[in-house]
Amino acid sequence: MCHHCGRSQHGMMFRVAKGQSTVRLCVRDAILYPPWIRNAVKTAIVVGTMLALINHGDAYWVKPWSAGLSLKTALTYCVPFAVSMLGALTASRINL
Ligand SMILES: [Zn+2]
């Protein structure tokens, strides 16, 4: 049973830290678990900035920015965010 919403889940469950012990969360509440989101945002800012500069660094100095560059930059930040979240979910998954 999910510690947050109380629903019993027949699918995937995840184990997260709660004080000195651990609790179980359903998929939805695990994805919305604030410490993982904070960590993923920090990772996205650091790694996303490095990736953006590596991949598109020259284009940022040419004005005006194209819509394509803005989209590519946004996607560049999404990649480390997704990797961080998937890593947290994979590492904490409980096989029932
Ligand atoms: Zn839940």
Image: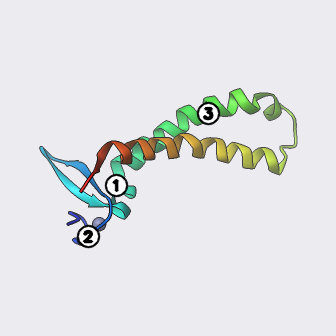
Of 63 and 68, nearer the camera is 68
Q: Is residue 20 left or right of residue 12?
A: left
Relative image position of residue 83 (x, y in whole percent)? 50, 42
Query: Is tag 1's residue or tag 2's residue first in the polypeptide sequence?
Result: 2
Q: Quadrant of residue 26?
A: bottom left
Residue at mark 2: 5
Of 92 and 66, nearer the camera is 92
Q: Report how far apart the C-alphas of labels 3 and 2 lie in the structure.
A: 35 Å
Q: Amino acid at mark 3?
A: Thr
Q: Label 3, secondary structure: give it.
A: helix
Residue at mark 3: 49
Q: Amino acid at mark 1?
A: Tyr
Residue 61 drawn above or below residue 27: above
Relative image position of residue 40 (x, y in whole percent)? 45, 43
Residue 47 drawn above or below residue 16: above
**Label 2 residue near ligand 1, CB within 8 Å:** yes
